[in-house]
Amino acid sequence: MKSIKKTMSRREFIRNSIIGASVMASTSVIKFASAQVEPPLLRLGGPIFEKFEGPDAWIAILKRLGYRAAYCPVGTGEKDDVVSAYSEAARKADIIIAEVGAWSNPISPNEKERSQAITKCREHLALAEKIGAKCCVNVSGSRNEKHWAGPHKDNLTKETFELIVETTRAIIDDVKPTRTYFTLEAMPWSYPDCPDSYLRLIKAIDRERFAVHLDPVNFVSSPQLYFKNAELIRECFEKLGPVIKSCHAKDILMKEDIYTTHLDEVRPGLGQLDYATFLRELSKYPDTPLMLEHLPNAEEYRLAADHIRSVAQTIGLSFG
């Protein structure tokens, strides 16, 4: 007899897997509530500004900051034994290495830039595999020749969607990861630009090691989404929760003294992103890291972390 997995289409299998895992996550939350036991600890992380030499010093800094997740501490040129040492240190300390950034433009109209970006994605995905990171993350890129992740009239077209699919498949097929994932972070003007386009990409790319990196701020591209961002966050987790491998923590603020829509990225706590909803949804997947980014110094990161922890505390959650 053929297995169910073999007889159903790939699209049906992905859809059913996501739905099944979502039901299991919701059931787990209900069990925690009904049994009156402590909810699972969440994982917060961010860049570190102190210099360190070796895995032990790295772990010590993370613990002092109260981080249970971390950005990858080494580059692609590092020796295998050093990479392994950091991986083992993280495992022993219960630190999750959240992501390896491969920031580049693999769909650039400039062929040299495109080729270099694809090589970078492959190398960084291989590093994520070696060190055991949750994912390697990039944006899909842009057809903009001047701004590698900027807006362009051709970004949200069928042709560009197909180019993203082809390029992403090639990166994953070349590296063949078995314990990490290649992920694309959303942008307001590039695919994926909403939860449904994430689902379309998952189905079209059709690779088990392709997954989602969630940054809800990057979805907020209109007043409608700005004022209803709690609903947007719930939609993200309802549709994508089991395949979200890492999240970014930012905030967003709409200017009120001008007469065109102007949205600014700001430090968590200074904007209107509904962090209570974000953390409640994230608590269904407690080993999915929440990573701070884009702040200028250690003090700003401390203030951001303090805000997120305070929101967690008000809703009965904790980062440990």
Image (cartoon, helix red, strand yellow):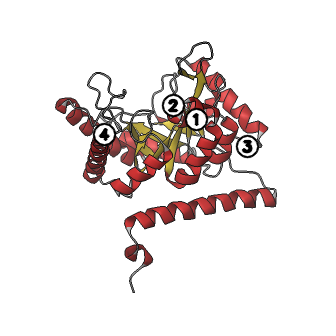
Numbered badge on residue 121: 4
Q: Residue 99: give x, y in percent of width and height.
A: 45, 40
Q: Nearer the viewer, residue 37 or 34?
A: 34
Q: In the image, what residue type sits under mark 4?
A: Cys
Question: Which image quadrant is residue 178 in?
Answer: bottom left
Labels 2, 4: front one: 2
Q: Are marks 4 and 3 in contact (CB under 8 Å)?
A: no
Name the N-terminal-most of marks 4 and 3. Answer: 4
Residue at left offset 28%, top offset 31%: 143
Instruction: Give SS at disc 4.
Output: helix
Q: Quadrant of the N terminus?
A: bottom left
Q: CA distance from mark 3 to mark 2?
A: 29 Å
Which of discs 1 and 3 lies nearer the camera? The answer is 1
Residue underneath mark 3 = 317
- Residue drawn 64% across the image and 32% down it: 227
Residue 108 screen position, x and y as percent: 25, 32
> How crowded is the residue under tag 2: few (<14 C-alpha within 10 Å), some, or many (20+)?
some
